[in-house]
Image (cartoon, rainbow, N blue to C red):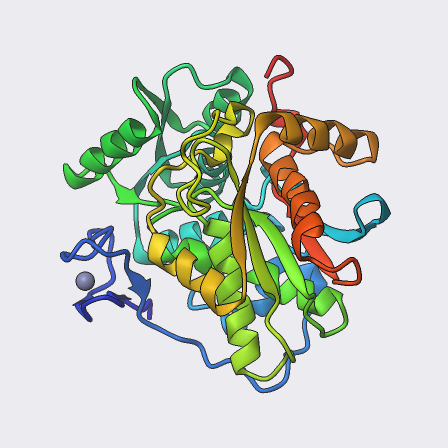
Amino acid sequence: MVPGLVCPACGRQYEPGPDEPWRCACGAPLEIDATPAVPEMPPAFDRDQGLWAFHSLLPVDREVSLGEGFTPLVEAPEWNADFKLEYVSPSGSFKDRGATTTLSRAAALGVERIVEDSSGNAGAAIALYAARAGIDAEIYVPEGVKPAKRAAIAGTGATVVEVPGDRAAVSEAARSAVESGAGWYASHAWNPAFFAGTATTAFEIVAQRGGSAPDAVVAPIGHGTLFLGLFRGFEAMDAAGWIDQRPRLLGVQAAGVAPIANDGSGARNDFADGIQIAEPARNAEIERAIETTDGDAIAVGEAETRAAWKALHRAGFHVEPTSAVAVAGLETYRERDLDSTAEVVVPLTGSGLKTDPSA
Ligand SMILES: [Zn+2]
């Protein structure tokens, strides 16, 4: 039995099904109406199951999987941190975590056609898992999207719809298609099943560290899909008594389009265009995650991002610019108030292979 949806803002409930709404009548993002009980002790897990090793903690059953999750956690001595290599994923980014849970729920509901909008990684991940599920996909992208990103989506057999205008115009076009019946909205920003998947990042970090949480996690924030997954995962483990402390969640945004860091005035960091989101769908929860974990959000500029990106590649980490944003931000946090003894994990979100060399 697939659970329905509930609105945390007003309490309205919705029956599950291919025609369920993509957001509440009150306008708020919905959640899955099920909270799996987190056992008091971490369950025995089998890494060969990838992130589905934690299936008992997820409100979604596995229907569509490509072996995602349990990405390596490796030392990065140059940065005095551990990097979690999310780019070692089926479509090359952490978005596969959300894609496996979102398409699993879609398949369980009998959805035949999905719609998503993305500037790159989320579109590629959703399209890949839709292909695996045998579900038709229509992915809305900004007009003039980089050829490597377009190819990653189109190669799955998905229909690519190019939309003129800014990133917000692309979302608007996708949502009006959904509302006129084009398909189920598999949005990485709005669909609650996506966040069930990204929460597994936190479970894995604790499992890979032998049961302890780090002092801080530094992660990029666009729509906050990874940041909120981390928050939800650590919160669940803290409530269950698995960990002694919740890590500080330290967000990093692209200068010029940084609503959480409150930095929209400076020069735009267009190198990190993957996280240029002016209005994150779950803004209020991102603020709460920062507040309750003694976290923070800062913005970094293009020059620092490029420098970090080059240094990462030379050190063996071939990542995309948005991953370098987090590493550039780590340096700023270290200078500010992050003690050099603090144990820090930085997820490297996406592969450099999809980055246009001329970027
Ligand atoms: Zn509501």
Q: For the point 62% across and 51% down, which residue is it?
A: 67
252 on left or right of 335: left
In the displayed orientation, state which residue is furthest to the front: 336
Name the residue at 41% across, 31% down: 265
Residue 356 rendering spot, x and y as whole percentages: 60, 18
Residue drawn at the location 62% of the way across and 38% of the way down: 323
Tally of numbered tags:
0
- Image quarter for ligand 1 equals bottom left
Q: Is residue 81 above or below residue 165?
A: below
- Any part of residue 194 in sight: yes
Side of 59 where 114 appears, left or right: left
Can residue 92 be seen at all in this image of the molecule? no
Which quadrant of the view contains residue 44? bottom right
Quadrant the N terminus occupies: bottom left
Query: What residue is rendered at 33% in x and 48% in y?
Result: 281
Residue 218, image x and y in percent?
Answer: 62, 52
Name the residue furthest right. Answer: 77
Question: In the picture shown, does residue 210 fall above or below 142?
Answer: below
Asked if residue 263 lies left or right of residue 106, the reply is right
Residue 301 versus residue 348 in the image, above or below: above
Question: Quadrant location of the C terminus?
Answer: top right
Question: Which of these two is toward me, 191 or 229?
Answer: 229
Q: How far from the left and from the top, in percent, is residue 194? A: 43, 53
Rendered position, 162 above or below 80: above
Give the x, y percent position of residue 174: 27, 33
